[in-house]
Amino acid sequence: MLKFIEQSPLYRIANARSMAFFGASNRMTSMGTHLFSAALAGGFKGALYPVHPKEENVLNLRAYGRAEDLPEVPDLAVIVLPTQLVNETLEACGKKGIRQAVVVSGGFNEVGGGGGELESELKRIAKVYHMKILGPNCLGVANPHQNINTTFIPNESLPGFVGLASQSGSLVTQMFEYLSGFNLGFSTAFSVGNEAVLDIVDCMEYLGACPHTKVIALYIEGIRKGRAFMKAARSIAPHKPIVAFYAGGSKAGRAAGFSHTGALAGPDELYDGMFRQAGVIRAGSVVELFDACWLLGSMPVPRGNRVVIQTHSGGPGAAAADACGRVGLVLSKLSDKTLKNLRPFVPPTGSVGNPVDLTFSKDHNDFFSHIPEVLLAEENADILMVYLLNPSLVVERVLKGLGISEKEAVVQGQKIIESNAEALSKFLKTQKKPVIAYSFHRPDAHVMKAAIGKGLPVFQGAERAARAIAALVAYGAVRKKLTT
Amino acid sequence: MLKFIEQSPLYRIANARSMAFFGASNRMTSMGTHLFSAALAGGFKGALYPVHPKEENVLNLRAYGRAEDLPEVPDLAVIVLPTQLVNETLEACGKKGIRQAVVVSGGFNEVGGGGGELESELKRIAKVYHMKILGPNCLGVANPHQNINTTFIPNESLPGFVGLASQSGSLVTQMFEYLSGFNLGFSTAFSVGNEAVLDIVDCMEYLGACPHTKVIALYIEGIRKGRAFMKAARSIAPHKPIVAFYAGGSKAGRAAGFSHTGALAGPDELYDGMFRQAGVIRAGSVVELFDACWLLGSMPVPRGNRVVIQTHSGGPGAAAADACGRVGLVLSKLSDKTLKNLRPFVPPTGSVGNPVDLTFSKDHNDFFSHIPEVLLAEENADILMVYLLNPSLVVERVLKGLGISEKEAVVQGQKIIESNAEALSKFLKTQKKPVIAYSFHRPDAHVMKAAIGKGLPVFQGAERAARAIAALVAYGAVRKKLTT
């Protein structure tokens, strides 16, 4: 594990103070222009130098003809040129003294044939000029904490705590919007491409040392340096959780991955074993990967796997119990103390087993305040799982029934839903146990926006919630195993 | 299988022309009032009679003191009274000549003890008065095609094609909003509760004969009459797909279900075998249940399990290939003809394997029109799976780069995204193969709303899409097996 993040060869890439773009033009349909536009849109504070053989200005910034013409030695060169121009440009950058590069261009190892030779030459140039290179065939880096984004899609999400090292560029760019839906964002995300020079292990080490990163996500199509990967993971995992999605697990996924980055994937079991030994938590899909990150980055690590489920609907309660059972979570047996403390809040039709099924709460607000408080105090429970149901239409109807005007009912209804979400999310700060919600509300429902906005993880359906909780529990076991 | 829907004992419940509500009042916090409000909000066209011992009017409708005071014999009595009043009310309804009832009240078999005796008495009354009863401990019925909704949550979704029979009332009410997010809706949904008189088999038979229902969804905590279930399912499944989620599969789920409706659940394998023999497709979660319904109700049944994946992102392509591989789908080998026809659209960096990875399309619009057209003509492929990426910000940036004003770019950008969605969804009507999309866009993204609005199923992440496709393929096999 790196002691200081500055020791990482990726440091000046992810924290570049100035960047030159090779391949940006004024033609909006070119990939280079897209990347440069996204960098501009991201509000990068340092100097940006478009390099173009003919244009005087590119997107209203002064352009330079060649690397040697640049007025200073930028920290980073971003290269989006036709394949055959990449190596000579890299060499010119090296001569200029540039020591970091992101090579976006494809046409190297991943296409086979002459591409392999071009990649060998790229590596030779990197060696000669001591250049740290991400790629080729990658989208580089997004570090929202520094307004750095070398990819072609603007980052819509806020600076966050999810560190990502990905063998797919899309799974950087296309996660900006996705993560923003959960109020999440990247600390720093790397697209590693063909890993000619810097690889996914370097990224893991950077993210391990990165103070903004609370959890490391990996998208893997094939690991090249198994031993280095294991060593790095084992040194980081006791301090920071690592979750991986491996796309090469099935035969079809393996073949697809190979044609994508040329990565050599192995059978599922091999990776399963490697992840287990390395203390890496495995996710079954991209969705699961970030679901797990959500909890691992925002929740305390539970002491065990005992869940208490709070619901006012029997079906969603049974479905959650089933989902927990399938992923190795157990339902807590409630203590007499808890049963006694719950009594005042449970109507005769409610159940005081686990799931705690309240059917109709006597007081709607109790569901978000007193009841979770009692359940979080349960000594036999490590985790609270809450079914979230707070439909605007019903809340408004009750208010209208009390004689409140249509318009006012909408306003008051929102306030009630927000204060319920506030009450429930309060426990995220005051209690040391994870609180996770699941729901069938549409993502654009008030209650979803209110709860997620206040930091409460809410999953669509019990299964996603249960799997993410299982990842959280698994990390507790990893940490115990690797530190003892 | 029923020849005519009118033969079903549920017919006059799901198509009631007049309803009496027992338990509705002017107190907005009571369950009965909630149910009555939802019925009112649903725009029911027939007569509604609140029955209340004291009030002259309930929610501005004339109230009647007792069943015998009603001015006509309504088709349906909805009963939301304290448990001990239910049976005498039912008896009064029977005497009045009412032949259909929904008993919402709980406190019967599901609570044990004296509840069992009350339920026996309820059954006796049903027999004496030839009453068809849904419940007790249920939420009754929602038939949006007739503006009927006896549950307590207003139905936000449009009349649709999903028929539901559920052992959980919540999984009726809480799916209104959920389904509306996919532009789906119920044909008719039944909450069966304790199934004292009418049960889930009756509902299946009704839905099997219902002309609005294209697919039948079942939420099951335990099947009481295994043989009748199998017989009904086997007669319906060749004509109409049936999908079931069984919540009692794990030990925890089983225990939760028992305390909910008193249903006796059996081990997973038992249900697995029963579903297989009955031609019922099994879903692993509530989310999977409705994902499968989406495709089964809106897509043609594919000839086989051969998928072609279209993407311009390698990572999502590999993830989709992996997801397909894990659920028994195979990736088609593309014919020479297809490879030749694709060539004009594929840039040098694109891959002409399967996944068809186009990286950057030469013309953005081809991705939604010419390319899927070529792939749908592939004789080795039964299903087209498309990765959907069309970010507003990028489209707008290109337009702004072409000199179009900020404001106009937003308008034009939306139009482009909508016309792309239109082009892709056109194939739903003109081709006989299923087209399914997956994406990491937020559900509120323009492209998601546009595509889903035009009837294209779009799933979050490849795994959900692959599982739903697998259900569609499984139905093809069921139909073949049961009809030969």
Image (cartoon, coloured by chain):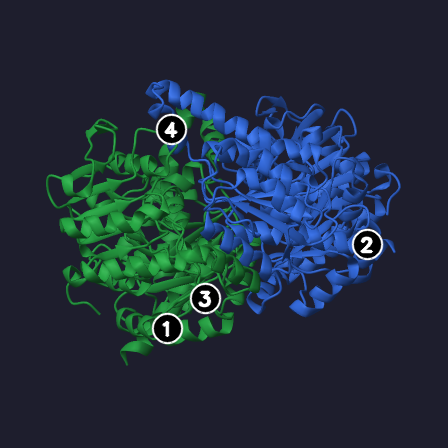
Chain colours: A blue, B green
Q: Is residue A186 above or below residue A301?
A: above
In the rendering, at what x and y percent does residue B33 appear?
32, 35
Is mark 3 in CB contact (under 8 Å) with mark 2?
A: no
Q: Name the mark on residue A72.
A: none
Q: Secondary structure at mark 3?
A: loop
Residue under disc 2 on the same chain as residue under disc 4: yes
- Residue at the disc numbered 1: B226
Q: Amino acid at mark 4?
A: Val
**What is the C-alpha distance between the residues marked 1 and 2?**
47 Å
Q: Amino acid at mark 2?
A: Lys
Q: Quadrant of residue B429?
A: bottom left
Q: Name the mark on residue A480.
A: 2
Q: Residue at x 27, y 69 (%)?
A: B236
Which of the image's four quarters has the C terminus of chain B? bottom left
In the rendering, at what x and y percent does residue B59 appear?
26, 28
**What is the C-alpha distance between the residues marked 1 and 4?**
42 Å
Answer few, some or many: residues within 10 Å of disc 3's Cα (few below 14, many 20 plus, some between 14 and 19): some
Which of the image's four quarters has the N terminus of chain B? bottom left
**What is the C-alpha distance between the residues marked 3 and 2?**
40 Å
Judging from the image, mark 4 belongs to the subunit labelled A
Q: Nearer the viewer, mark 3 or mark 2?
A: 3
**Front-most of A392 and B320?**
A392
Q: Amino acid at mark 3?
A: Leu
Q: Residue at x 51, y 32 (%)?
A: A449
Nearer the N terminus, badge 2 or badge 4?
4
Nearer the N terminus, badge 1 or badge 3?
1
- Residue at the disc numbered 4: A398
In the rendering, at what x and y percent does residue B75 appear?
16, 48
Q: Residue at x 37, y 35 (%)?
A: B30
In the rendering, at what x and y percent does residue A356 appear?
55, 48
